[in-house]
Amino acid sequence: MSARDLVFASIRSSLGVDGHEAPRRKEVTDRLRDHPTGVVPARGHLAPDGRVALFADMVTAAAGSVTRVNAAADVPKAIAEFLRRHNLPPTVRRGEDARLAALPWEHEKTLEVTLGPSDGHQLASVSHAFGAVAETGTLVLTSGADNPTTLNFLPDNHIVLVDAKDIAADFESVFARLRARYGERQLPRVVNMITGPSRSADIEQTLILGAHGPRRLHIIICD
Amino acid sequence: MTQAATSPRFKENARAALADGELQKSLKILETNFIGRRKQVADKLPEFDALRDAARDIKNHTLAHLDLYLEEYERRVTAQGGHVHYAVTAADARSIILDICRAAEAKLVTKGKSMIAEEVGLDDFLAVHSITPVETDLGEYIIQIRHEMPSHIIAPALHLSKAQVAADFRRVHKELPPNRNLEEPETLLAEARAVLREKFLAADVGITGANFLVAETGSSIIVTNEGNGDLTQTLPKVHIVLTSIEKLVPTLEDVAEFLRVLARSATGQEMSVYTTLSTGPQRPRDPDGPREYHVVLLDNGRSAMLGGQFRDMLRCIRCGACMNHCPVYQAIGGHAYGWVYPGPMGAVLTPSLIGIDKAGNLPNASTFCGRCEEVCPVRIPLPKLMRFWREREFERHLSPATVRAGLSFWAFFARRPWLYGFATDLAARVLALMSGARGRFRWLPLARGWTDRRDFPAPQGATFQAQWRRRH
């Protein structure tokens, strides 16, 4: 018997089943198809403005920073301001995301924008979030050439652009959008849910930001 | 064989822990940092208790259909180009991982935090086979360079002070200037970050654990605060997920329920910083990510637990709330338990994994105060499960003769209520008389275990039963 067979045989003997019981199979198939919603906290269920405000509050509580801009055209300026505020060189790296590509980067003459994943040598990166969750102040980012995963973790400063309309009340709403975009039972290689900058409390439970990932997480909400 | 256990020497371990001043100082942190913060965030979420019920029900449902969800999960992983390997024992898991590492010609392996890796003793095994494993979670890194086991399942270096960590860094990071300042946690973290950043970029294989496996999508999920798990799994060409069969949940909606109770119960955060869902290896247009994705599913006795009294234990999501709230853990820390899993969850799980003959002391190391069950996010009846182990230990004649004799003596009276009432009433009166005005005993025959460290309070007249009868 293979290891796989042994494990399945042992599970089935413990459960007193043979794996062919139709009602058991149906219960599993139904649940995977219907993915019923469980208990959802009321906290995030607010009108759009309240939802964005809650998201910003939760991000701030998790030690991230937030700016809100009225139009996509204002984003390069907001990025340049963030870099200046922290005395960082005016350089950012981004992926091929069409929404990022369409920004008027030329408005910020001194800002240098490079393309591609990170190899660990960049100080700041810009990503476009797939969505966000107001309930906990969580960003949801998906992997791929548009927004390479390495940009979320290697640079010291991670700047994330999120559209106000994509800030959902709860996780379930974002999962529903992921299914609509990638298909039932499909996900991109990685979905990163990010709540604040990297941190550790492993030495005497003293909380310090910037453990292995970014020291700063700056979110630009775009209306 | 899994990690070597010192659980049979629990009593000696506990005595040493109580006398360890540095450890006692470190353990004070539990009250302020873990217990206080958990309560704060739990109180802020009105649905918290309903979510705990939901989490319990989802795990119960999944465990009752585990074979079928495993099949579905495996199918999705394979469809995305990943590989699923089954390991019946710890030795199987180690050799599967060694084979994958060898096929990748790996010399350096980075590791995210994984309790299963601790359980199977992976680091020592890889090192013996000329593969260098580097732990990248700060706490795990610290205990790795000290050659210790974690003392807490989510805060592995909880038992150490910053001065101890500084001494270890000076000892191990020989290439750095010996007179550098390492006084504060900030400088220690900065040093570890710089040292480990090199390792992340150089590693051939990255090994992580998994908090959850999702049957719907074939995804593995890690939950971290440092981001080390993500660098571990993103940068090398091979990602191995080392996990166990009970981590399965059906759908993404089910995942949401667990995320809402996990961080709150563990660190008192609303949400951990990084929750990452990984599904298969690099896709055609991906500019980064691993080219191979392997999942090693460990059984190691878990499938057998499904059939017995300890099935409830398989709901555990490894948050650590039970140990944070346990008066015994608070007093002796994690190492005294002598194996990978300490505290109340360890007292139930360890005997299942290494045998009650070796771990019999652990389920006895409880006052049955019930706080562990009160805070458990999946409502595991931990005291009841510890009692099951005590019963088994008794049935198998593993408990010491004095304990057995004492229990038989007590049972003789307990089976004869009139005699029990008479004897306890008499004892209460005699003890009250003997103690005189002080109302306490400094010494009592057969009670040195108690009176060596504190006075024994004398009964205040009548027994509880007698007082109860009088009032009702």
Image: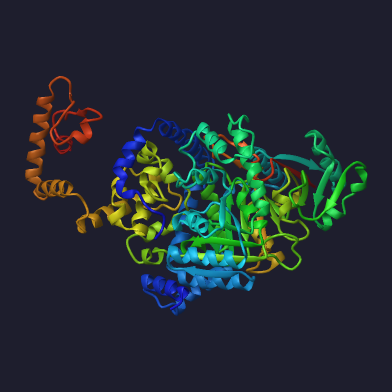
Give the percent coordinates (x, y) of residue B55.
48, 56
Give the percent coordinates (x, y) of residue B350.
36, 54
Residue at the image position 63 percent from the left and 63 percent from the top: B238
B130 or B321, nearer to the observer: B130
A21 or B347, nearer to the observer: B347
Report the side of B4 relative to B42 (left or right).
left
Residue at the image position 11 percent from the left and 29 percent from the top: B431
* Quarter location, residue B406: top left
Residue at the image position 74 percent from the left and 51 percent from the top: A151
Above or below residue A154? Residue A10 is below
Above or below residue B88? Residue B470 is above
Return the residue found at the far top: B437
- Count of numbered marks: 0
- Quadrant of the drawing holding the N terminus of chain B: bottom left
* Quarter location, residue A108: top right
Report the side of B52 relative to A40 (left or right).
left
Q: Is residue A142 visible?
A: yes
Q: Is residue A38 visible?
A: no
Report the side of B301 relative to A130 (left or right).
left
Give the percent coordinates (x, y) of residue B138.
57, 43
Looking at the picture, the colour scheme in use is rainbow
